[in-house]
Amino acid sequence: MDTEDSGSVSLVSKEGDTFEVPLKVAKMSELVKTMIDDEGDEDVQEIPLPNVKASVLQKVIDFCTHYKEDPMNEIEKPLRSSVMNEVVQQWYADFVSVEQVMLFELILAANYMDIKPLLDLSCATVASMIKGKTPQEIRETFNITNDFSPEEEAQVREENRWCEEA
């Protein structure tokens, strides 16, 4: 193990909860990596993450810790299946089998903290929820209200008929 990756850092959530995390795990976040002092301080540094709730930060840490031990398979694009355990290993599929609110919080946290594998996984999960569904089914899945009048919807369908024929 690199000596610069030994030690730990404290990540502080939006609510002020502190999570002590090994440096090698914390450095999966490009944001955290750039905030860490590389001067070899013995003190545990505190990195504030004001955009990340404690419950979400715990999930992010769980992901990064597991990823360091067992990296996730690369996600093929376009998705070959809407079943996540056919796209990634079972642990990762189970990891994103969460309520929609948590899934979207993970996307926001992964984007804010700049953790590409987590962002890829969580966005692929949303894509799998959309894959093969009609616009109406997508609206129902994500509780989206249709604000088109029937005439506007017919016009949009006519303008985009070419993509439904493919």
Image: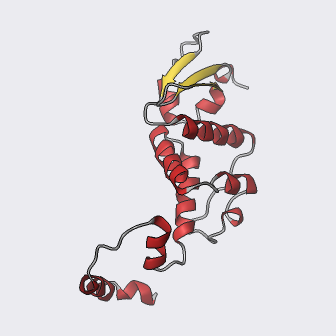
In-image side of 52 versus 8 (left or right) = left
In-image side of 62 versus 143 (left or right) = right
Residue 94's image quarter?
Answer: bottom right
Residue 80 visible in image: yes
Residue 18's image quarter?
Answer: top right
Residue 54: horizontal and vertical position, in percent? 55, 34
Q: Is residue 67 above or below residue 81?
A: above
Residue 157's image quarter?
Answer: bottom left
Q: Is residue 58 above or below residue 165?
A: above
Q: Nearer the viewer, residue 98 or 42?
A: 98
Question: Which residue shows up at 46% across the image and 65% down it?
Answer: 142
Question: Which residue shows up at 43% across the image and 77% down it?
Answer: 135
Question: Looking at this rendering, what residue extends furthest in the top direction?
Answer: 42
In-image side of 4 versus 110 (left or right) = right
Residue 36 visible in image: no
Q: Nearer the viewer, residue 75 or 62?
A: 62
Q: How many marks?
A: 0
Q: Nearer the viewer, residue 78 or 82?
A: 82
Q: Nearer the viewer, residue 67 or 53?
A: 53
Q: Is residue 45 above or below residue 141?
A: above
Residue 128: horizontal and vertical position, in percent? 57, 67
Query: What colour scheme does the image use?
Result: secondary structure
